[in-house]
Image (tube, grey):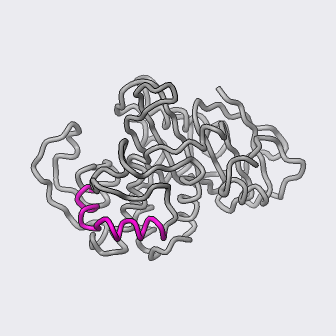
Amino acid sequence: MARCTQASGAAMRASLLAMLAPLACARPTTAEPPTEANPPPASAAITIDHPGCFMISRKDGTQSTVVHPQECAVATAPASTFKLPHALIALQLQVVADIDTLKRWDGLHRWNPAWDADHTLRTALRESVVWYFQQTATDIGLQRMNEWLTRLDYGEGGAAEPLNKFWLEGGSLRVTGPEQLAFVQRMFDHRLPIDAHHIDAVSQAIAGPLDDWRGRLPPGTEPPPSQATLHAKTGTDSTVLDDGTTGQVTWWVGEVEGPAGTWVFVSRVRAPGEPSMQSPAVAAGMRALAQAGVL
């Protein structure tokens, strides 16, 4: 497990999001006064254990922490975390009229019974319905999808055929930890070329207490105590690990609004094993958020 302490200061923001090399997991020599009523204690070192990539930043960028910067620099398929920019593009282009417009199920049975039904964009985000977004990708089209990926400055490699798989393992799109963090920070700060009401709609669709992610934990595992509201999205897919074997990549990215203020975070774990409903990124991310004192 890596152990990393929290760093603060406005200068961290540019280095965190522009490149990983300058990032350091050291305590600051000075700290800006907190604005929240109950911030994490700036005077005490905060130790965070995480088996993969973990990044967290105060929403205004004045405090940032990274665990395993070299691992965070590795680009992988975004899997279902891509549903965040995907939903925003679909709404902005009016491919989907609004967050609650119903799309009819195609009648094909899939491994997740929750997908075998009609869905709105809201429920498709909550249930991570793959067929729904495969249809919207086709409706958006390759040219417009790439234009908007560029405008949103999201990931590497862009969209390529087959258009219904480019964000999954074997597809063209790849994203690093810092790229994910930069995107969610711009999204929740309304600094994307997307109408604000579309961002708000997507944000509310993925909002909930920490307990909403209980089902992604190993059996018998309990979420840590929390007063926070999260606006977050998971992602799970197969991946090729560093040793050449096939394993899984899991993501959990989003925003935390709690007693310590508003933060954005990224948790990603690459590990052996087949993808499943259990998410190592969620389990490790919950522990890391609790250790960071933001829940």
Q: Which residues are magenta?
A: 133-151
Residue sitting at x 62%, y 54%: 263
- Is the residue 75 above or below the residue 33 in the image? above
Number of marks in the rendered image? 0
- In the image, 223 versus 154, the foreground residue is 154
Residue 269 seen in the figure = yes
Return the residue nearer the eye: 76 or 48. Answer: 76
- Where in the figure is residue 250, as x and y percent of width and height? 45, 38
Residue farthest to the left, as pictured: 107
Q: In this image, 105 relative to 171: left or right?
A: left
> Dividing the picture into quarters, in which one does residue 225 lie?
top right
Q: Is residue 206 magenta?
A: no
Q: Position of residue 137 (x, y in %)?
A: 28, 61
Quadrant in the picture for the N terminus: top right
Depicted 39 relative to depicted 141: above or below: above
In this view, the residue farthest toward the right is 29
Q: Which residue is found at the position 42% from the left and 36% from the top?
A: 214
**Residue drawn at point x = 68 percent, y = 43 percent:** 66
Q: Where residue 156 sits: x, y (%)?
A: 49, 55
Q: Is residue 58 visible?
A: no
Characterize the magenta stretch by its predominant secondary structure: helix
Q: Quadrant of residue 101?
A: bottom left
Residue that appears at 50% across and 25% down: 243
Quadrant of the snapshot with the C terminus: top right
x, y percent for residue 262: 62, 57
